[in-house]
Image (cartoon, rainbow, N blue to C red):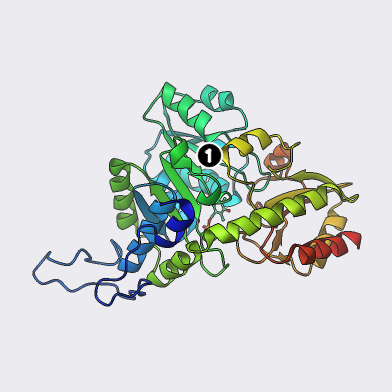
Amino acid sequence: MKFNTKTIHGGQKPEEATGAVMPPIFQTSTFAQSSPGKHKGYGYARGANPTRTALENSFAAIENGTNGFAFASGMAAIDCVLRLLKPGDEVIAGDDLYGGTYRMFTQLFQKYGLEFSYVDMNSVENVTNAITQKTKLIWIETPTNPLMKIADIQAISSAVKNINTAILIAVDNTFATPYLQKPLDLGADIVMHSATKYLGGHSDVIMGALIVKEEKLAKEIHFIQFAAGAIAGPMDSFLVLRGIKTLHIRMQRHCENGKLVAEFLENHPKVGTVYFPGLENHLGHKIAKKQMKDFGGMVSFKLKGESKEATFKFLENTKLFTLAESLGGIESLVNHPVTMSHASIPEQERLKIGITDSLVRLSVGIEDIEDLLADLEQALSL
Ligand SMILES: *Cc1c(COP(=O)(O)O)cnc(C)c1O
């Protein structure tokens, strides 16, 4: 099956009892047993639930993995990956990360004895130079949130595995989605998603996903998920499965609109730097072109003059672009990283990588492009 077919049919079959084409929402916590320990594959719903299983099979299919796991949130999925490690282990992560990921690394897991180093993953050498005897995990986000930096997944994976095959490579594929890039095919061991974003796609559910391609890792992750309990519920699983069925056509439009918005901003007299991997002057453009099918719908930019007042005026005056946290839904959203998504990053760290007061992040939706550009134009002209 090719990708578009997989989003609809991957890992799916009509439900056995009734032939229902969409899996029913199995709103149950437990399943009858005919004799102690004897059941039809489902014991207690923390371990597995048929609606969640249908979604997890879809996750595995669209990322070309063998096993998928649905979590209560993207953060719960990342938490599960870190629980594969033990005190003293080291993690190398990118220097531009989703704020919540940075918060979890620095404020939760550092307390439990994990060590983190942060490097600019634009260069493979920065990653390999940071490897020590204790390195157990490389955490890659590409494109990054909010600066849209690009890391070469294939080059990093092969360079790291050349040094030590036991080091795990995990990729947060939230921004790109498997429509644009498939990290497992590029050498990664684990793919993570905030399914809250493009996979769900309709801003109506919080969920996380992990996908792997190897049985031993799948067993470890299933054990942690079952033992720690941060699972996705059946209703949410139904919603995200429904969302995935239109992922490919939504992403196609997100990409078209994202590119036009980036070009509009680049030519606008009030706009300074535009961060979009589809622009030829973007630092990661070449790698993005090689690694991704298209460039996605996320666009960040700075206002010329770096004025906080002017930036807030813009943020208060967009009408179609709703000022809100999150991204990846059908509707366009605008976000101010400094006060919203990335508020948990200390000012000094933010400024080091360029997250300033005038930085704005757009999640370009699938509305008519003329309406989106008109909205940006009127808000910029105020
Ligand atoms: C939103 C997001 C997360 C966290 O996911 P939640 O579903 O909000 O817990 C992690 N990584 C990236 C890139 C995100 O955008």
Regarding ligand 1, which quadrant of the image does it lie in? bottom right
Q: Is mark 1 within 8 Å of ligand 1?
A: no
* Coordinates of residue 110 in the picture (x, y in percent): 48, 41
Question: In the picture provided, is 381 more to the left or to the right than 217?
Answer: right
Q: Secondary structure at mark 1?
A: strand
Q: What is the quadrant of residue 31 in the picture?
A: bottom left
Q: Residue at x 74, y 37 (%)?
A: 280
* Coordinates of residue 344 in the picture (x, y in percent): 63, 51
At label 1, counting other C-alpha atoms closer than 10 Å, the crowd grade (few under 14, some 14-19, many 20 or more) is: many
Q: Residue at x 57, y 38 (%)?
A: 291
Q: Residue at x 54, y 43 (%)?
A: 106
Question: In the picture provided, is 37 more to the left or to the right than 161?
Answer: left
Question: In the picture provided, is 229 more to the left or to the right than 5?
Answer: left
* Coordinates of residue 88 in the picture (x, y in percent): 41, 33
Question: In the picture provided, is 308 more to the left or to the right than 349?
Answer: right
Quickly name the residue at label 1. 140
Vertical relation: 27 (above or below) 324 = below
Instruction: Report if residue 198 is visible in the image.
Output: no
* Coordinates of residue 297 in the picture (x, y in percent): 66, 54
